[in-house]
Image (tube, rainbow, N blue to C red):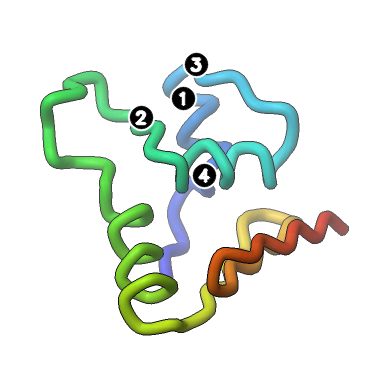
């Protein structure tokens, strides 16, 4: 569990554009990092964790950020906005 700024909150502080919270989540899991040094290994935790859980262990992931829920199931993405 992470109770920090939220994905969109971190994007806001880094001037990264997004349409809504789920779009911000999609950008984050696609590998977009808020860390300025792109050669850094920082900012890869979410994507790495998702790959390990979903692809490596056939698991499911539920991401809740602000008011949106994003569910990843083996190669199926379900996007639910409230």
Q: Which label's residue is closer to the chain start, 2 or 4?
A: 4
Q: Which image quarter is the C terminus in?
A: bottom right
Say which residue label 2 marks: 34
Q: Which label's residue is closer to the chain start, 4 or 3?
A: 4
Mark 1 and mark 3 in contact? Answer it, CB < 8 Å. yes
Say which residue label 3 marks: 15
Element type at mark 1:
helix
- Say which quarter of the image contains residue 39: top left
Give the number of the mark in front: 1 or 3: 3
Of 42 and 78, nearer the camera is 78
Q: Residue at x 58, y 43 (%)?
A: 26
Give the number of the mark in front: 4 or 1: 4
- Say which quarter of the image contains residue 63: bottom right
Residue 54, given in percent of the width and then of the height, sits at 43, 73
Tell whether 47 sits left or right of 59.
left
How much space separates mark 4 and mark 1, taking CA atoms? 10 Å
Residue 74, given in percent of the width and then of the height, sits at 54, 73
Mark 2 and mark 1 in contact? Answer it, CB < 8 Å. yes
Mark 4 and mark 3 in contact? Answer it, CB < 8 Å. no
Element type at mark 2:
loop
How much space separates mark 1 and mark 3, taking CA atoms? 6 Å
Say which residue label 1 marks: 13
Element type at mark 3:
loop
Q: Is residue 62 positioned above or below 7 on the image?
A: below
In this view, the residue farthest toward the right is 82
Of 5 and 19, nearer the camera is 19
**Dot 3 alpha-carbon crowd within 10 angstroms: few under 14, some 14 to 19, many 20 or more:** few
């Amino acid at each position: 569990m992470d109770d920090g700024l939220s994905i969109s909150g971190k994007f806001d502080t880094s001037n990264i554009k997004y349409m809504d919270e789920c779009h911000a989540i999609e950008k984050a899991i696609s590998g977009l990092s808020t860390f300025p040094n792109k050669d850094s290994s920082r900012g890869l935790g979410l994507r790495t964790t998702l790959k390990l859980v979903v692809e490596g262990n056939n698991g499911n992931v539920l991401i809740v950020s602000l008011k949106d829920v994003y569910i990843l199931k083996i190669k199926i993405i379900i996007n639910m906005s409230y």
